[in-house]
Image (tube, grey):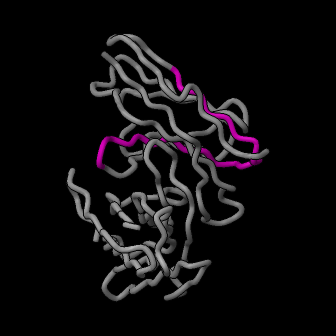
Amino acid sequence: DGGITQSPKYLFRKEGQNVTLSCEQNLNHDAMYWYRQDPGQGLRLIYYSQIVNDFQKGDIAEGYSVSREKKESFPLTVTSAQKNPTAFYLCASSKGRLAGVNEQYFGPGTRLTVT
Amino acid sequence: GESVGLHLPTLSVQEGDNSIINCAYSNSASDYFIWYKQESGKGPQFIIDIRSNMDKRQGQRVTVLLNKTVKHLSLQIAATQPGDSAVYFCAENAGGTSYGKLTFGQGTILTVHP
């Protein structure tokens, strides 16, 4: 059963704590992405990675960090420096550069609430 | 069509009608476009895509039209069903240094009444 998994589905944290969101894919995709979605809005790109051990900042990277040590995993850390961390976080993957631009497949999302 | 801001455009149709969802894009260098469907609390699902060397592409019950002259994209859903109710997003890829990155529109809420 191939796909993208994100865990947990709901996450609650106190202000000032760092939190790491998990994203795993078994689609053998090279590229992976993290988006943030706020109520009534579209998706905004936080970070993306076209290949293992390499990643680039997206449009709203401040207050976030990522790593890409394995092809199938792209964890996102929401740090205490992120001013408005409460949001719905979506991870996606795609075949990557060698396959040409193509669709991104999305995980089910993690809803993070920080109080 | 889609617009910037917190109030998403909405489209209400009766079951069985055809639906047309519009999207205006701003980057004339964009060469790949895609439509996603997102149900409440879930991740977006791929519907259909189109490259800039085409102006029309058809899938099962869906058609995407691309007008590069006016930078406009539309999604047509035939015989709309209640299960089609969702938020629909268009996205574009500008290529070049933005290779692989998708820029998403704000979304349109489609409500299908039985």
The residue that appears at 33% across and 25% down in the rendered structure is: A82
Location of the N terminus of chain B by quadrant is: bottom left
The one of A85 and B80 positioned closer to us in this rendering = B80
Q: Main secondary structure of the magenta part?
A: strand
Q: Position of residue B91 (x, y in %)?
A: 44, 63
Which quadrant: the C terminus of chain B? bottom left
Residue at position x 36%, y 16% in the image: A80
User: Is residue A102 rendered to the left or right of residue B30?
Assistant: right
The residue lying at 61 percent from left, 52 percent from top is A105
Does residue A115 lie above or below A46 as drawn? above
Q: Position of residue A1 (x, y in %)?
A: 79, 44
Residue B107, located in which quarter of the rendered image?
Answer: bottom left
Q: Quadrant of residue B85?
A: bottom left
The picture places residue B36, in percent across and down from the top left corner, at 49, 61
Give the vertical position of B77 relative to A12 (above or below). below
Q: Give the quadrant of residue A22.
A: top right
Is A41 placed left or right of B85 in the picture? left
Q: Which residues are magenta?
A: A20-40
Does the magenta segment cover residue B17? no
Q: Position of residue A87 (x, y in %)?
A: 36, 33
Query: Going 48% across and 70% down the picture, which residue do you hit?
Result: B81
Work out whether B114 lies above or below A40.
below
**B76 sits left or right of A72 in the view:** left
Residue at the extreme front:
B114
